[in-house]
Image (spheres, rainbow, N blue to C red):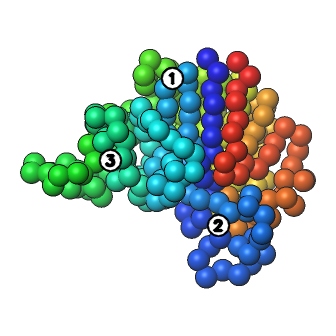
Amino acid sequence: MPVRMEFLGTGTSQGVPVVACACAVCTSADPKDHRLRSSVRITLGEHELLIDAGPDLRQQALRSGMQRLDAVLLTHEHMDHVAGIDELRAFNYAQKRAMDVFGQPRALEAVKRTFHYAFAKDKYPGVPELELHQVHREPFTVCGHPITPVEVMHDRLPVLGFRIHDVAYITDAKTIAPGERAKLRGLDVLVINALRISAHHSHLNLEEALAVVADLAPSRAYLTHISHLLGEHAAVNAVLPPGVELAYDGLVVNSAV
């Protein structure tokens, strides 16, 4: 089945521009240098999925024109990936049902702590209605569509990427074990994080991300979860290998089949 992926945000935890920064990237007039926190909208036929619900979700949903959302997949529990979960109540109202949220047990427990009011016995009217579903390394289905989790390591923290048909989305990775890399072969589209030029203890830098792309050899690769330290979009994009591009907010990618 064809997969439509829209990049709602391609920035790191601080976004770009960064508050109180006057560097060339943060003051750039190029809209491709303006990055909200990382998230993607996945369209599979009539179904709409969201990977991560960060603090910019309201702005992202309005810009994208999202009228429906069937489920949310969480990569992990860091706030730049879950802080917008309260915004899901808008879809509760519109769709008259709880929102299905899929994630590792640890991530779901963090959601319960952070949004404790949504799980109270005596709920205040209007809180988000969430139906939590635990996932591990085994494949699962959402709205009848097969999803393959891919575990990557974010320093010491296991984070899930997701393969959906011939498209895979990986964020906040530093290392990927051989067995998990095997799940990422034969892709049409690979999305993977590339934080900056210099090394980082918990994120792939540009050199490391390109090495992963070269090893996995997808038809196309897009880099995301980008900080202002990577450089200006136009300059970096111009020197990337064939078949590799920097993603940017609002970019839409369709799988080949």
Q: CA distance from mark 1 to mark 2?
A: 32 Å
Residue type at mark 2: give it.
Answer: Val
> Label 2: few (<14), some or many (≥20) within 10 Å?
many
Q: Secondary structure at mark 1?
A: loop
Q: Amino acid at mark 1?
A: Glu
Of tags 3 and 2, the one toward the viewer is: 3
Which secondary structure, mark 3?
A: helix
Q: CA distance from mark 3 to mark 2?
A: 27 Å
Residue occupied by mark 1: 46
Front-lying residue, 81 or 204? 81
Q: Secondary structure at mark 2?
A: loop
- Nearest to the observer: residue 194 or residue 189: 189
Residue at the (15%, 55%) spot, across then down: 124
For image coordinates 70% across by 68% down, the residue present is 228
- Residue type at mark 3: give it: Arg
Q: Decide: few, some or many residues near mark 1? Use Cα within 10 Å; few <14, some 14-19, many ≥20.
A: few
Q: Is residue 84 left or right of residue 146?
A: left
Closest to the camera, between mark 1 and mark 2, is 1
Which mark identifies residue 89? 3
Residue 144 in the image: above or below residue 244: above
Q: Answer whether labels 1 and 2 touch (C-beta < 8 Å).
A: no
Which picture quadrant has residue 134? top left
Residue 16's tag is 2
Seen at 63% across and 40% down, the residue is 6
| Image position, residue 63 (x, y; %) | 57, 51
